[in-house]
Amino acid sequence: MPTNLLRVLFIKLSAMGDIVHAMPSAMAIRSRFPNCDLRWVVQTEFADLLKNHPAVSGIIEVPKRPSIADLMRLRKTLRENVFDFALDMQGLFKSARIIAMAKSSRKLGFQWQREGSRFFSKPIRTDAQHVVDQYLAVAAAVGADTADVSFGLAPMPSALESAKAKLQALGLQKPIVAINLGAGAEEKRWPAVKFGALAKALISHGCSPFTIGSPNERELAAQLNIPSLAGQTSIAELVGVLSLCDLHIGGDTGSVHIATALEKQVVAIMGPTRPERSGPYRRMESVVYSPSGSLASISEQELLEKALARLKLVREI
């Protein structure tokens, strides 16, 4: 390995959508330094998002709640290398303790450093609103050109085949619409009864809706009485499933950001969180937003019109 090879430690542990949002920064660094050694530190449950990712040289997995032994092993792994840059893209205590272990004289972080993380890395300030652009500011500080944005996300071949089989088993006909009822917080969830009415309306317009989500959403998804893959896909398979769909509808949740990164049509239902910061990147036209923060105020008809408008674009391609 050449001694002048740029080594970058890239720390973004969670969650699913946030990891996707950080991908363009890794891609920008890879584009500027094609032979760089970029190691991404991520929580084990999200590691499949990064396998075969073109920007990532290696993945360092960390349990969600690491033990002392886990942290000691991690420290040993990190101390085996000297990194030209160590980047804290999380800005929390759990990432700060990792960057503190790293051997690097240049430790940078994105601007929203909390829980004391700013004492371990230098926050890179920016006027950018969207979190993707805030992460890209850190890549720019490394020397990357951030003008052209690419997520670099694609389904793994084996997971894509598995996703095809699972969708075929549901007997769906195009256009296929994936619906995710879940979100990280209750206030980010559009009511299930409204999703049910939307699903019926989509069927009446010739669409084939089905649900996706975590095992926790199985019971909720069953209320819609439509085909479901909720709790039946790994993260790698979820990427494959979304790559095969014509449209994805969901709230401020990871699957919407995966679909956006895959350049699929989406409809994002947002209220408590601002779409300018965490909505589908450069897809404001895909957002149905409640300024009051109450998602229940968003009507089924409004969602249906938005969904059909996005599907029209699919049919025109």
Image (cartoon, helix red, strand yellow):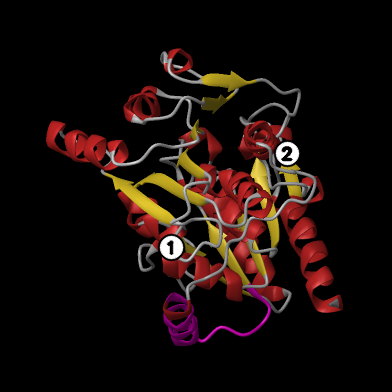
Q: Evaluate whether residue 256 shows in this view.
A: yes
Which is in the foreground here, disc 2 or disc 1? 1
- Residue 14 lies in quadrant: top left
Which residue appears at 62% of the width and 73% of the height? 245
Which residue appears at 63% of the width and 62% of the height? 248
Describe the element under mark 1 as helix, strand or loop: loop
Task: Using the image as rendered, state which of residue 273 and residue 295 is in the foreground.
Answer: 273
Q: Is residue 198 left or right of residue 225?
A: right
Q: Is residue 48 left or right of residue 19?
A: left
Stretch in magenta: 159-176
Q: Quadrant for the C terminus, please.
A: bottom right
Q: Would you call the spot at circle 2 few (<14 residues within 10 Å), some (14-19), or many (20 or more)?
A: many
Question: Whole-Å distance between the Cαs marked 2 and 1?
Answer: 34 Å
- The residue that disc 1 covers is 51
- The residue that disc 2 covers is 289
User: How many numbered circles are shown?
Assistant: 2
In the rendered image, residue 82, in percent from the top left (x then y), is placed at 39, 37
Q: Are marks 2 and 1 in contact (CB under 8 Å)?
A: no
In the rendered image, residue 110, in percent from the top left (x then y), is placed at 58, 27
106 in the magenta segment: no
175 in the magenta segment: yes
Q: Earlier in the sequence, mark 2 or mark 1?
A: 1
Extreme residue toward the right, this view: 316
